[in-house]
Image (cartoon, rainbow, N blue to C red):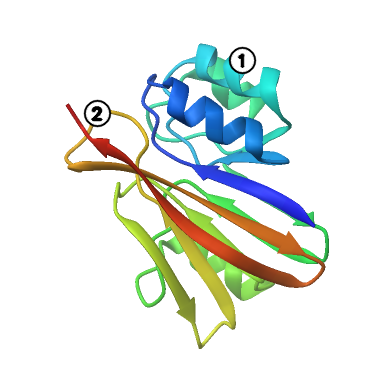
Amino acid sequence: MTKILLLSDSHSYIDDRILDYAKQADEIWHCGDFGSFEIIEQLEKIKPLKGVWGNIDGAKIRSEFPEVNRFFCENVEVLMIHIGGYPGKYTPLAKKEISEKAPKLFISGHSHILKAMYDDKNKLLHLNPGACGKQGWHKMRTMMQFVVDGEEIKDLAIIELGPKV
C-alpha cells in the first residue's frame, strides 16, 4: 500500500499545510509548473518525488524531470504529462501516449481545474489535482491524496488548501 500526495501548479509557492500533507504520504507526485527549484528541494527532503516539467519551468527543472513520465506504482501503470487535457479532450501528445499503451492512471495539470473522471474508452482513471499555488485564475488552492494498493487506486480525497489570496 502506497500513500500518494498529488500536486500541480505550485508556481514557486509552498506552505506548511502542503508540507504537513507531504509528511503523511509515502510518495509525492508533482504534475509540473514547480516554478522554482527550491520547491523540488523542499519536497525531496520529505519523501520521494516523481514529476514532470511544466510550461513555466526553466532549464534546470527540465533537466531533472521529463516532459512525459511513465512509471509503475505497485501494479498500477501511471502516465503523467503537464499539459494533457482530459477524456474526450486530450492533447496530441497525451493521445499519442495513451493510444500506444493506455495506463491505468493518467495525470495531468496545467488547467488549474481539479478533475477526477473515468475514461471509459481507454479504461483509465484521469486525475488533475488543480493548483496548489497562488498564481493563476483558480479561486481555491487544491491537491489530492489517494492510495495505490496492488492494482487498486482507492481512498481518493480532494484537499482544499483555502482561497488563493
Q: Position of residue 45 (x, y in %)?
A: 69, 17
Q: Give the answer, above or below, for where 25 lies relative to 124.
A: above
Report which quarter residue 96 is drawn in. Answer: bottom right
**What residue appears at the point 44 percent right and 40 percent down from the top-left corner?**
8
* SS for dot 2: loop
> Which quadrant: the N terminus?
bottom right
Q: Give the answer, above or below, for where 161 lies relative to 121.
A: above
Mark sitting on residue 144: none
**What residue appears at the point 55 percent right and 72 percent down from the top-left corner?**
125
Q: Which residue is mark 1?
A: 41
Ranked by sequence position, the earlier of labels 2 and 1 is 1
The span from disc 2 to disc 1 (Cα, nearest Å) is 20 Å
Report which quarter residue 44 is drawn in. Answer: top right
**What residue appears at the point 68 percent right and 23 percent down from the top-left corner?**
46
164 lies left or right of 99: left
**Quick check: marks 2 and 1 in contact, CB under 8 Å?**
no
Q: Return the residue found at the far top.
A: 38
Disc 2 residue crowd, few under 14, some 14–19, many 20+, Cα 10 Å = some
Residue type of the residue flagged with mark 2: Gln
Q: Position of residue 100 (x, y in %)?
A: 66, 71
98 lies left or right of 111: right
Q: Position of residue 33 (x, y in %)?
A: 42, 32
- For this rendering, which residue is in front, 121 or 128? 128
Camera sees residue 63: yes
**What residue appears at the point 50 percent right and 67 percent down from the top-left corner?**
126
Residue type of the residue flagged with mark 1: Glu
Report the number of numbered marks: 2
Report which quarter residue 55 is drawn in. Answer: top left
Q: Which residue is mark 2?
A: 135
Disc 1 residue crowd, few under 14, some 14–19, many 20+, Cα 10 Å = few
Q: Position of residue 38 (x, y in %)?
A: 52, 12
* SS for dot 1: helix
